[in-house]
Amino acid sequence: MESGKNGFDRTGSFALVTYIPDPLGKFLDELRLKLVPGCDPHAHVTLMPPRFLPSTEELAWQHILKHTSHVSAFDLEAKEIEVFPTTNVVYIELGEGREKLMELHQILNSGALAFEEPFPYHPHITLAQGIPVESVPAIAEAARKLWAEAPVSRRFPVERLTFVRNIGCNQWLDLASVELQRPVAVPR
């Protein structure tokens, strides 16, 4: 049985993510495998952290569609490597676009997706988690070195949001996706 960061079993929980496209996504997956061999990476940013639903999966999906139908695609920028002090998760901080994620999270964490989260929402890209505490400094330093040498752009578009369910052992199943609106070019 798989436990989450607070020791609860996340099997059957739901989340909303945006996957990071290649080439950055591929680089991050390879980086994560170097830091935590044997993990099953799929580079993403979480908009709605894992939660058990107060209603049905269908109502949650309708809630997502209702509150994202007017949202335009936007860019995110990956910044520097950090470590969450309480959970020892090694992650990449986000810069440009972070406020848009915060706004979406605040709007979506209601109704059919309402959940009292154990930590304040902090959008990021996870690189290593569930690692022994004594390994954290070395893994964080290795991540900083490899990230500094990254041959890819640190900016990426958020064009699609994907609703996922944990099916056990930290495996996530994609249930449905919504495309964000393309910004309309204004003629000059």
Image (spheres, rainbow, N blue to C red):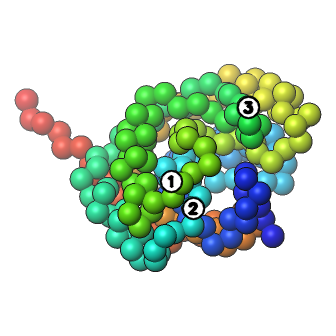
In the image, what residue type sits under mark 3? Pro
Horizontal and vertical percent position of residue 31: 73, 39
Q: What element carries label 2?
A: strand
Q: In which quarter of the image is the C terminus?
A: top left
**173 is higher (above) or lower (below) than 107:** below
Horizontal and vertical percent position of residue 76: 45, 35
Horizontal and vertical percent position of residue 173: 60, 70
Q: Is residue 32 left or right of residue 115?
A: right
Q: Can residue 150 be seen in this view?
A: yes
In the image, what residue type sits under mark 2? Arg
Q: In this view, does 125 lie to the left or right of 56?
A: right
In the image, what residue type sits under mark 1? Met
Q: Is mark 3 on a helix, strand or loop?
A: loop
Judging by the rendered image, the residue that carries numbered circle 1 is: 48
Q: How many labels does the image show?
A: 3
Residue 151 sits in which quadrant?
Answer: top right
Rounded to the nearest angstrom, the CA distance separating label 3 from label 2 is 22 Å
N-terminal-most mark, 3 or 2: 2
**61 is higher (above) or lower (below) than 3:** below
Judging by the rendered image, the residue that carries numbered circle 2 is: 51
Q: Nearer the viewer, residue 96 or 63?
A: 63
Q: What element carries label 1?
A: strand
Asked if marks 1 and 2 touch (Cβ < 8 Å), the reply is yes
Horizontal and vertical percent position of residue 164: 54, 65
Judging by the rendered image, the residue that carries numbered circle 3 is: 85
Q: Which of 13 and 34 is in front in this view?
A: 13
Q: Which of 107 and 165 is in front in this view?
A: 107
N-terminal-most mark, 1 or 3: 1
